Amino acid sequence: MTSLILILAVGLTAFSLHGTRKVEAETRALEEKIKGLDEAVKKTPFRLRRKLNRLLLLENGRGPFPTVTFAKSGKSARVFFPWETIFSIAQEEGMGLTGTCEGNGDCGLCAISVVSGEDHLSPKSREEEDLMKKMELPAGARLSCQSRATGDIVVDFIQY
């Protein structure tokens, strides 16, 4: 009888160790998955995280937010923060708008024409006025890196 109990005890111990090892292995696998997901989140492009933040603002019912519509593509984007320029919004939406001055208003490559809603743009700075004169941009043109929307607007890119 004691040998039977001893055999059962050894069997239960072996089964318990096997179960524990299996749980430990599954735990390690889950920890690796979590670590991989954490690294993926850290590598997520800034643009996508900003889009997520924008969607969360919408979902929470904050607003209303001005809309910038890009005439040629028909794409629209909302302006959630007062410091966002038309240039930064176009970049976040993947519109392919470029510039070499990194938003300083020095190059003029981000020039846009305002199709409608010109009164919903921030006032022109002296630097923007000077560069627009130098480049002989048409009336109604603005530098997207210097322009902030305060209401709904429609813009088009000026091609050189």
Image: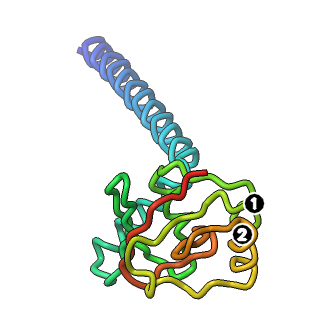
Evaluate if marks 2 and 1 touch, with contact meaning CB atoms under 8 Å apart. yes
> Toward the viewer: 55 or 38?
55
Looking at the picture, does residue 154 appear above or below residue 19? below
Choose between 102 and 119: the one closer to the eye. 119
**Toward which corner of the image does residue 69 lie, by quadrant?**
bottom left
Q: Which residue is mark 2?
A: 105
Badge count: 2
- Judge left or right: residue 150 versus residue 43: left
- Amino acid, disc 1: Cys
- Point out residue 62 in the picture as x, y percentages from the top left corner: 33, 82
Q: Judging from the image, what secondary structure is the residue with disc 2 in?
A: loop
Badge 2, how many Cα within 10 Å: few under 14, some, many 20+? many
The kind of residue on which mark 2 rests is Gly
Residues packed near mark 1 inside 10 Å, few (<14), some (14 to 19) or many (20 plus): few
C-alpha span from label 2 to label 1:
7 Å
Picture residue at 31% right of the left edge, 16% below the top: 11
Residue shown at 51% from the left, 37% from the top: 36
Residue at 45% from the left image edge and 61% from the top image edge: 156
At horizontal 74% and vertical 61% (from top left) the residue drawn is 107
Q: Quadrant of residue 100?
A: bottom right
Quarter holding residue 144: bottom right
Residue 145, compared with residue 94, is above or below; it is below
Q: Can you give x and y, in whole percent of width and height, for residue 139 in the image?
A: 55, 75
Asked which secondary structure carries label 1, the reply is loop
Residue 66, relative to residue 159: is it above or below? below
Name the residue nearer the viewer: 78 or 38: 78
**Circle number at residue 101:** 1
Q: Position of residue 157 (x, y in %)?
A: 50, 58
What quarter of the picture does the N terminus occupy?
top left
Q: Which mark is residue 11?
A: none
Horizontal side of residue 50 vs 154, given as left or right: right
